[in-house]
Amino acid sequence: MSPSLVIEGIDCTSNFSLSFSVYILIYIAAVAAANLSVAHFGPASTPINAFLLIGLDLAIRDRLHLDWHGHSLWARMFCLITGAGVVSYMLNPASGVISLASLVAFSAAAITSAVVFQAVRRYPVLTRANGANVASAAIDSVVFPLIAFGTIFPTIAGLQFLAKVTGGAIWSWVLLRKVRIA
């Protein structure tokens, strides 16, 4: 039997298949790698992270949104985002401010993404995912640097946004191209 994570009486891990577990582990590893990289290399590393790692996270979040819809979605997303921040902090406590910035930015972006993803549910999955990713990338590209660095570097924020949207589109195609909604 696998261990459970329970927050506020909601089991964040019940009824997970192997694919759920793999998506969750990849999500947490990608967020932790992005956070630790920013803590080590600074703001200049964020556009590369945005393309490779955050775009992947956006696509995984959309995939899990589809799979978890109606099954404690908000609590599970909160567990996922919080877990990634905790892992980042545990791996390098000096990255505390980066982990906090990530937690707040991903939470704000996740709410934005979920609202857009649901609002456009009559469209094909890839259209929904990419529309939600544009909105969440905009939020994340402003909130993260404000908390992590106390300012927004316009060029870096613009590059982050473009990289997240582009990376998110590529990863969405990889992860969602065969998904059909009944």
Image (cartoon, rainbow, N blue to C red):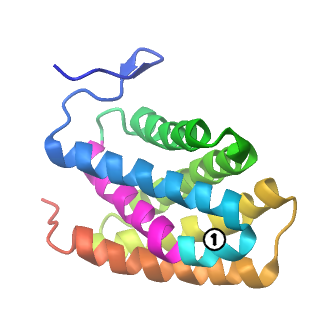
Please name the amino acid that badge 1 sits on. Ala
78 relative position to 12: left or right: right
Viewer-side residue, 102 vs 142 = 102
Seen at 38% across and 20% down, the residue is 10
Magenta highlight range = 50-69
101 relative position to 151: left or right: left
Q: Within the magenta stretch, is there residue 45?
A: no
95 relative position to 6: left or right: right
Q: Secondary structure at mark 1?
A: helix
Q: Within the magenta stretch, is there residue 67?
A: yes
Seen at 34% across and 54% down, the residue is 26
Viewer-side residue, 165 vs 23 = 23
Rendering coords of residue 144 (x, y %): 70, 59
Viewer-side residue, 58 vs 134 = 58
Residue 142 location, quadrant: bottom right
7 relative position to 129: left or right: right
Query: Which residue is the site of mark 1?
Result: 138
